[in-house]
Image (cartoon, helix red, strand yellow):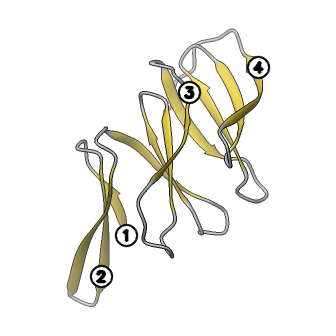
Amino acid sequence: LYFSAQDGILLFYHIRDLQYEMKVCADISQPISSLIFSPDYASLLLVTDQGLVYSYKPAHSGEAVKLLDTCSTCFLAADFLTPGNKYCVSVTISGEVQVWFLEDGTCLGKLNLDIEVHIT
């Protein structure tokens, strides 16, 4: 079980029967708004409401790597664009949808929906 609280620390709970072990995986020093696994479960996106997206690879147990900075204070969400885990899509509250290449953080395209977006 991967978990993050408002302190920006990614935690892993290994649960077996009635026992558990907690491990600190990464500290990005910014509140994490969502955690999204890639379709193959090889990468975990850590998304902040300030527009930063980090990647954490559970099998490698390294630090979280900053993939991109959307520079948006109205950033709402991001997710992998399937199939694969090379691209992600993000959306802002103002309705701007962007597609990103995750290897170098290049924005590949934008679309403005001209409508305010909410997640329910």
Secondary structure under badge 1? loop
Quarter residue 22 falls in: bottom left
Residue 71 in the figure: left or right of residue 23: right
Gap in Å between the C-alphas at discs 4 and 1?
A: 34 Å
Asked if disc 3 and disc 2 are in contact, CB closer than 8 Å, the reply is no
Q: On residue 15, which mark appears?
A: 2
Asked if disc 2 and disc 1 are in contact, CB closer than 8 Å, the reply is yes
| Of callouts 4 and 3, the N-terminal one | 3
| Of callouts 2 and 1, the N-terminal one | 1
Residue 52 in the figure: left or right of residue 16: right
Label 3 or label 2, whichever lies nearer to me, is 3
Gap in Å between the C-alphas at discs 4 and 3?
A: 14 Å
Q: Position of residue 88 (x, y in %)?
A: 67, 43
Secondary structure under badge 3? loop
On screen, residue 45 above or below 99: below
Label 4 or label 2, whichever lies nearer to me, is 4
Q: Position of residue 13 (x, y in %)?
A: 29, 73
The residue at 57%/20% (across/down) is: 117
On screen, residue 94 above or below 5: above
Pointer 4 local density, CA inside 10 Å: few below 14, some 14–19, many at least 20: few
| Of callouts 4 and 2, the N-terminal one | 2
Q: On residue 111, which mark appears?
A: 4
Q: On residue 70, which mark appears?
A: 3
The residue at 76%/20% (across/down) is: 111
Label 1 or label 3, whichever lies nearer to me, is 3
* Residue placed furthest toward the top: 114
The amino acid type, in three-letter code, at marker 1 is Leu
- The residue wearing badge 1 is 1
Q: On residue 47, which mark appears?
A: none
Asked if disc 4 and disc 3 are in contact, CB closer than 8 Å, the reply is no
Quarter residue 40 falls in: bottom right
